[in-house]
Image (cartoon, grey):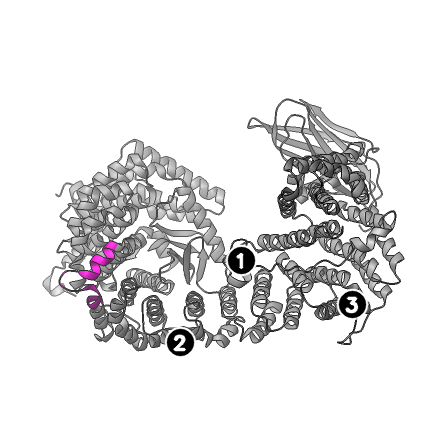
Amino acid sequence: MNSEHGFNPAFNMATIRQAFTEAVERVRMPTPTRLRDLIRQIRAARTAAEERAVVNKECAYIRSTFREEDSVWRCRNIAKLLYIHMLGYPAHFGQLECLKLTASTRFTDKRIGYLGAMLLLDERQDVHLLITNCLKNDLNSSTQFVVGLALCTLGAIASPEMARDLASEVERLMKSPNTYIRKKATLCAFRVIRRVPELMEIFLPATRSLLSEKNHGILITGVTLITEMCENSSDTLMHFKKDSGNREIVPNLVRILKNLILGGYSPEHDVSGVSDPFLQVKILRLLRILGHNDPDASEAMNDILAQVATNTETSKNVGNTILYETVLSIMDIRSEGGLRVLAVNILGRFLLNSDKNIRYVALNTLLRTVHADTSAVQRHRTTILECLKDPDVSIRRRAMELSFALINAQNIRTMTKELLLFLEKADAEFKAQCSSGMILAAERYSPTARWHLDTQLSVLIAAGNYVRDDVVSSTIQLVSSSPVSEQTYITNRFWESLQVANHCEDKQPLLQVAVWAIGEYGDLFMYGSNEDEFERPTESDLIAVYHKFLTSAQVSTTSKQYALVSLAKLSTRLQQCVEEIQALITSFGSHLNVDLQQRGVEFTQLFGNYEQLRPALLEKMPAMQISRISSQNGESSGSFDDNSPEWNGTEGSGNALIESNINTMGENTNILLDLLGSTDLSAGASDLVVATDLSNAVHKKNTRNANDIAPVSNNQDLLDLLDLDMSAPALSATTTTLGGGGDHSSNMNNMLAGLDLGGFGGLDSTAGTGGQGRISSLPTNGNDLANMLGGLGGVGGGGGGLIDGNGGNLLGDLNPTAASNNVTVSPPQNAPKLTALDKNGLLVELVPVIGNDCMKIFMTTTNKSDNTLEQYLFKAAVQRSFNLQMLPPSGYILPPGGVITQEIQVVATSNAVLRMRLRIQYAIDGQQLVEETEVSGFPQQQPSTSE
Amino acid sequence: MMLFMLLFSRQGKLRLQKWYMAYPDKVKKKITRELVTTILARKPKMCSFLEWKDCKIVYKRYASLYFCCAIEQNDNELLTLEIIHRYVELLDKYFGSVCELDIIFNFEKAYFILDELLIGGEIQETSKKNVLKAIASQDLLQEDEAVEGTLRDIGLL
């Protein structure tokens, strides 16, 4: 205590200040809520609504003080507004007040004013001029902290205009003797250049002296500025290399770095034993830019990089931060071989680090350098494979990518083994990418054909349903181009794996490939030579398995498509069970799925009138020779690309098919079926775009081919003719529209394409006749063929009238759920209809249908008015004794004449009579309307027994 | 260069936001919302880095607060962790074992400290002592003004 002096200035000052403040608070009533109190009030709010009420009240108050130009409490009000802004409420009305605060003479006002400006201002034109003026004034202030505030604000929100207007001020301050101002001005210059690179010139002279300073603030900001300049323009980079004041820049930076690592302990800049890691990292980064593609500069920094790499303490994150930056620099400059190995080894050590962040960084960096230094990275392969088991997903992902980059012809066997283990246990998100990657690697490096086939099979088993379509098509392609012995072998393996896999619905890609192979090579599989001594099933066993797949609800339509085609093929390969096959196929003639139905009917034709064509049509497919060019060099167009593998993959294989078809064209008529088959190989059930693409491609190819022998117009005529033929049955078909029409129109395209091909195939025998003669010869020469196609067209028409000839349905198919909704919601024709509402042109009808365990009510809303009704919402309520479930409606917008349907399911739990209260909301021209009504007269239903 | 820094609580409440890029208000809100949900959903054993749009996100949790920074592709993510740590140290020194409440009630101080550490998304001062000295001097300037104002108001000056 200083009591012996009788006077303690600090003590007295504080008491006086407190007394005064209290006095002032008392005098000036009413005072606005203090910031602290407001925050307390807001935090005390229990609900969002309560909080909103507090905020709204305060905002209203703040607005009123702004209007009254109350300058005494402006600072406090802005501070409160900034808090409110952080909570997410609008606060833009405070922008101008912030500017007024910055113009005040008080430092407190300026401090809050600039803070507000940084938070509330955007780059709008009108405020820009005002703030520029404020900043200009303050940049010339005599108080260093005011200048500091202005520089900080400029650094945060400089727009290009502001940067231009204030660049010269910043440049002047960069030369200030005051280090506090100088470092801030240097970073401001960095920001100015970021926004307007042309302004770089004016700052160049001022950068000269920055690197000869001792102050770390100046050094780090200077290095940052120079880095930005060098990255921005190669001219400036050259300028710095040649001349930077008295000394060259590289030796200068090396000197600073050396001082940092060897200079001994300096408490001010020490971070757990490392001297100013922030500055070290910045210097290392600038060195990287200077040494990039510059042997001399690289030479000059080799030693210091080695020194940093070996001398840095690595027990903490700081040390590893510097090592990481050093590694990046070593990799980027023309460094010595030994140094590069050192760098990769540092990363190898990182991989073993217990800190997951460091492992992540290491994998990331290795991934970047793997192409330059493969052999060095290879040495850490085991560690990388170990990272596949890391608990962190991001690390596993990186490790997987890196593993793929490391696969080569020497290590493919071991790597594949490891990756297969990973694939089996991997999360769903990895499986697709991993399986595609493995297939690619196998394609590129597989040592033997059998190993390749085995790997392909293992991937299909391990990845199950996550396998992308490209894997399916590439496997099929691989099998089809293998020698006969391998085909027999793999078909047997496929059969085995089907037996072993207990849940085939989880491995549908495997199922697809397996049935394809069994169908294609059924004769080899069942009756060929059995070198590997596989156990063979009996024919009826085989058919039984097909029967199981085809009738299982879990097996997808695509898989069933494969199975049906396969079955048809088997009918010519097997010796006894043809009748069973026929029966199974015929049963699909009335299948609910259009495509399966079509296949069923088409294939049935092959057992009836066109029996004699069957063996020829179902010949083995020619080997698919086209392999993806990508797998060799990975850069050509149409290559396999991680971003869109499904697309390119399927397209690739589709083209392969077309290619091979064209090659064999003219030899036999089986092209047509192959082509039909190609739909299922190339496109999934609704992968419509690809399918149409494919058929377009077929068209193009054929047109080109046709050009060689006939004028285009003839070709066109032919198409026209066929088009007519096809659409005729459609006209007579019933008009029930179902979803999936698009699917069909693609099929129609395919058929047309097929016809196109087939037409020429048939014509080839009469090649050399004139174009005119070709058309007339079609009915005679290609008689059978044309008839059959006619049959197909007819079938298509009968199968539900799906050929409506317009492309509009294409869209329908892209949205399969909508389509299926339409199907389920259409009520039976004979059910009684209840009109719930008929008002203002809005007609709501309910059709109740009693089902087994619940009553289904089909709601149909028709808009008879001339207005478009939007946001249509249909709500229903029933008594307690009923359970109500509403399925999603078919839409929310009713154009004039439009219809919305929705299905409602009601389950009764007692014998009460159902009444339903309805609330119907919609908007016309943005105006909300509500209708309410009650409906009764539903048929009585039995209470659900389970309740 | 750092693109922005966000501080938010475990409940997802924003405690501080510093933007070094000019985004419209709507975009800022969207980014904040997206990042807060993404980061809060991450498990503690996951690493501190996220690849997000064309930048990298570095985040770290200190007690109940998440510190989250967006940096550019070329930036060193480990160094960003050090910057975050440095900021936490500064807050700790300034408030004396800082807690979330300090930052809520003195959010403007938290901004002032950050502004003495970073400008335009780049580090301006690597000495803790210098940063705290600058803050203390400015606080003193404010206090002097307060006293002066009070004296003037009651007619003593």
Mark 3 residue element: helix
Give the crowd class for mark 2: few <14, some 14-19, many >=20 residues within 10 Å: some
Residue A731 located left or right of residue A274: right
Discs 3 and 1 lie in a common subunit? yes
- Of marks 2 and 1, the one in the foreground: 1
- In the image, residue A827 lies at what x, y percent? 78, 36
**A414 magenta-colored:** no
The disc numbered 2 marks a residue on which chain?
A
Q: Name the residue under label 1.
A: A642
Q: Which sits in the foreground, A178 or B7?
A: A178
Look at the image and give the residue range highlighted in magenta: A235-253
Q: Name the residue under label 2.
A: A345
- In the image, residue A495 lies at what x, y percent? 76, 67
Q: Mark 3 points at which residue?
A: A525
Instruction: Identify the residue at image location x=16%, y=46%.
Output: B148
Residue A548 image-quadrant placement:
bottom right
